[in-house]
Amino acid sequence: MASMFARRPLLTTATATSVFAAAYYVSQPRRPFMLDSAQNPPMKTLAFPKNMLFSKQLKVTNVEQINHDTKRITFALPGGDKEVSGVTPGAAILTQHTPSGAWLPIFRPYTPVHDLDQRGVLELMVKKYPDGRASGHMHSLNPGDELTVRGPLPGQWTTPKDQRDILCIAGGAGITPIYSLTKGILANPEDKTRIELLWGVNGTRDIVLKKELESLERQHPDRLRVIYAVSGPEAKPDAPSLGDEMKYRKGYVDKTLLQEAITRCQKDGAWGDAKGQKVFLCGPPKMEDAMVGKEGALTELGVQKKEIHRF
Ligand SMILES: Cc1cc2nc3c(=O)[nH]c(=O)nc-3n(C[C@H](O)[C@H](O)[C@H](O)COP(=O)(O)OP(=O)(O)OC[C@H]3O[C@@H](n4cnc5c(N)ncnc54)[C@H](O)[C@@H]3O)c2cc1C
């Protein structure tokens, strides 16, 4: 998640964003239209404009406060039940916001969390940051309001032909791309990938999508393991146990936790996606630096930069 700002500063201005995004977008393969059948009446993919110079307005239909700082915002697709969003696993859309007094809009990526074959809706889970321009605007939206979006940004996942293991690491709100990727992989009968998911949160109150992740783990016990690394006051040695100690670990996503997960991934000797990426990482800048910097935990464990996908 850090990457979007630190490594792609062009995204902070309207003009540069459009040019960059359009060039990037047109260079990527597009998702094929979904097949129709007797069970599935004719269905279209939301017709986002062909490039990111142009936008689309989506209307808010529902807003739900999920926890102390996160809302789930549901938007209607213009084509209603005859349409799916067309966003692929792990992919994001670009949202546009014009803070009051600003001349230029700002753009922020958000990863939808609805089931990707769900018709008529697009759902975002939005964490509000103090003074956050986009997240503040998103949290002010009410049913009936509209949001300007572009996209979708292309997804990164290619289904491997053989069985593979990957390690997904999320920090805080960075869970949404990781969740979307995980759900997409597990929903695809052609995909046999196994996933170790490590999610670092400041406290148990920050855990969202818990029911959804538990349900995926129940449905796919051999293919998904989720471990929560809880830091903050609840991680103090004298703080009460967080429950299942193999599942709820105290502290950050550190080298020990990473090594354990990597060892599990390596046990069959086949890990990494079709492009050779082994780790999928999305978290706040500090966390990503602690993973992939010169002395980052992943670097020290021998995972090379090219084997890590940062969202
Ligand atoms: C591929 C991708 C998908 C994303 N999907 C989602 C999503 O589904 N849901 C979601 O809530 N967010 C998601 N994000 C993050 C989102 O795009 C914004 O970065 C975030 O909402 C903050 O934007 P803002 O304009 O509100 O904050 P800004 O106005 O840019 O910053 C306000 C303050 O918040 C701090 N801040 C900003 N971002 C972070 C961060 N990530 N961690 C810690 N502090 C931060 C800044 O340092 C600053 O102090 C995603 C990011 C990427 C790259």
Image (spheres, helix red, strand yellow):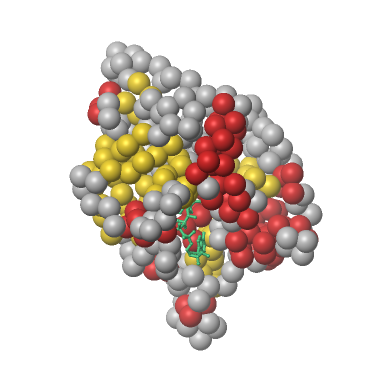
Q: Residue 272, position in %: x, y?
A: 68, 40
What residue lies at 41% left-to-right and 29% top-to-bottom? 48
Q: Is residue 256 left or right of residue 231?
A: right
The quarter of the picture where residue 2 lies is bottom right
Q: Residue 158's quadrant in the figure? A: top right
The total number of labels drawn is 0
**Residue extending furthest toward the bottom:** 238
x, y percent for residue 167? 62, 49
Query: At x 36% / y 15%, what residue is drawn?
Result: 36
Name the one closer to the observer, 51 or 235: 51
On screen, 79 above or below 18?
above
- Residue 170, image quadrant: bottom right
Q: Residue furthest left?
A: 144
**Residue 117 in sight in this render:** no
Is residue 10 in view from this perspective? yes
Q: Is residue 34 left or right of residue 5?
A: left
As drawn, 114 above or below 172: above
- Near-viewer residue (52 or 244): 52
Residue 10 rendering spot, x and y as whole percentages:
59, 47
In the image, 208 versus 105, the foreground residue is 105
Identify which residue is drawn at 48% across, 32% down: 53
Query: Residue 248: x, y in percent?
Result: 50, 66
Q: Measuring 42% from the left and 27% from the top, which residue is drawn there?
A: 49
